[in-house]
Amino acid sequence: MTGFIDYQIDTQYDLMRDFYASDSISWVVPEAERNCFVLIDSESRRHLCSITFDDASRRSGYITILIKTENSRWYELGFLLVSRENGVMKVKGLTLDCEDISERSFIPMNSPHFKDCLFAPAEFISDERYYVPTAFPISSFTKTNTDAEYWGITVAETSVDEVSDVKSVSDHFYIADIYSGTDHIDVTDLFKDANEKASQGILVKSLDTATVTVAPITYSGESQKPSVKVEYEGMTLTENVDYVVWYDGYAEPGPAMLITAGIGDFFGTPASLYTVSCATHSLTEISFSDSSCTEEGKRESICSICGDTVVETIPRKAHNMTHVPEVKPTEESDGNREHWICGVCEKYFLDEQGTRETTAAKVVKKYFKFIHDPADSPDAMKDIVKDEDAVYGFRPGETGSLKKYAAADWSDPELVEQGRLERIAYHQEIAGMFELLEQMQSEGKSVEEIAKAVSTRRNEIRIESYKDDPEGLATLKQRNLEQYGHEEGPLPEEQYLKYGSWEKVIEKAFSANKGMDVCLGLYDVYYDEYIALSRFTEGTVPPQTGDTGISIICLSLMLIAGAALLKETLCRGRKK
């Protein structure tokens, strides 16, 4: 909880904005005579100030001041270096660096740069959002006197009650009107309210932790009040209830600043920079990068009036295209797809406009011809369509069970090869069910029992195939849930009701989508397996004795033959 600011002159003298984050409700009114000093200007006006001493000896230190030069709208932060000589504090120079004694560099105080400037004793703010030039002046501004040594400034350890423009350190502070340098915003009541609540144990909330957003303003020739949004811990605050806005009132384009002052349950005075933009900029180019046929260019300019930076995007240049007509592949040589090559960037495209980029490898067409024509199989063609650009001459159709794969680039050899390998691995998992089938047959299990076991295992294999694809697995489970009422897929009993026999359930458990095999060039590899499955379910597998056990053995042998063909194919692939 908050208490009043505890001044510690022996150490860094900051106006700490996090004082109200303390857990204590005790508050200390500082002893002004011991902690504060009086700066006397060249016209004998007295100003409240403080000295931050370099060490515990209190022999040397600095007075923080704000300086506004004649041609600047902003205040600069400076430090008057002082040292004690014969018991009296004397000004020894001006620096812009107060931290390291050894690195302080003096600035000539009689420089024309400081002629007729305004300055005031101030407090250096510790919060990052109160960086230069938003320190707090703690007395009124006065003019510099560059004709006098050290601006004619003297420092006295005098009672603060003798300072004409403040009542006491504990209840009077100012925030500078940083726009004119003559007026001030009195925050006495804000401090009094916060301290009164502190004495009652009421927690006030710090606006210094709030997010202040200033809406853009465009020059209109008239004074415009900035539109401010203040958010505190996810809550949007209300103006004139939780805070008030102090702003400069300028109409001219350029940088500006406002202060958001907490009221009610809030306290703090965060400052925000914003810009009054020009209706029409006066731009000067500061950087330029030309465009090419592969990248956009950029021109960056700055407005000499308001200071806004304007970035202009330069469109990409057109490609210098060379057309390459289609060449059909033969058994003796490769062909290629119709494409275009840019003579500048040397990239490949499938259209003359250069919107469909490809690669040299993807435009090559390898000769391929199925031994068994998929077009002769309605079952294979129901989910796929012919496509001369596809690697194997076919791709999934926009309708059917494979429609979710239709958007893939089936002319990409690398993509299709990856899918081919994954498909082979899937078939190997299905072939692994032969062992389960043979084991159950040797144990004398019925066709129904075998059908239930292999159908359940098929569902498990399908789910396992998505182990590296969480999104695909979620989609599969959702589809199963919508279609069958459970995530794992169709139950054996549901398959039986659908197909009318346990033999057909076994066929479906071992079958794979022929259309996908065609698109991946695997139709010939598994062709004998398709035939074996169809003969079994049609009841044409010998011997025709009605012995279901023998029929299952025949099916198993035929399927194993298909697996052997697959194994042989894979071995040939490894040898290449």
Image: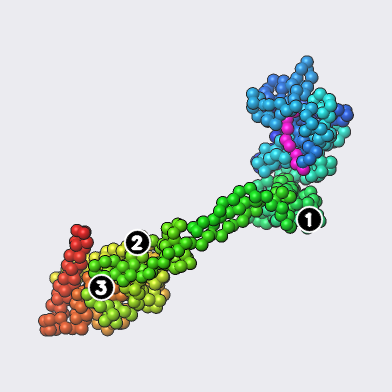
x and y, in percent, of residue 201 in the image = 71, 44
Q: Which residues are magenta?
A: 73-80
Q: Nearer the viewer, residue 500 or 47?
A: 47
Residue pictured at 47% horizontal, 65% vertical: 354
Q: Is residue 77 magenta?
A: yes
Colouring used for the render: rainbow
x and y, in percent, of residue 108 in the image = 75, 27
Residue pictured at 48% horizontal, 62% vertical: 319
Residue 248, above or below 506: above
Residue on which disc 2 sits: 361
Residue pictured at 15% horizontal, 72% vertical: 557
Q: Secondary structure at mark 1?
A: loop
x and y, in percent, of residue 424 in the image = 26, 65
Q: Looking at the image, do the residues carrying marks 2 and 1 touch, with CB atoms under 8 Å apart?
A: no
N-terminal of the two: label 3 or label 1?
1
Q: Residues within 10 Å of mark 1 (few under 14, many from 20)?
A: some
Residue on which disc 1 sits: 224
Which amino acid type corresponds to the residue marked 2 in the rendered image?
Ala
Residue on which disc 3 sits: 369
Q: Nearer the viewer, residue 486 or 430?
A: 430
N-terminal of the two: label 2 or label 1?
1
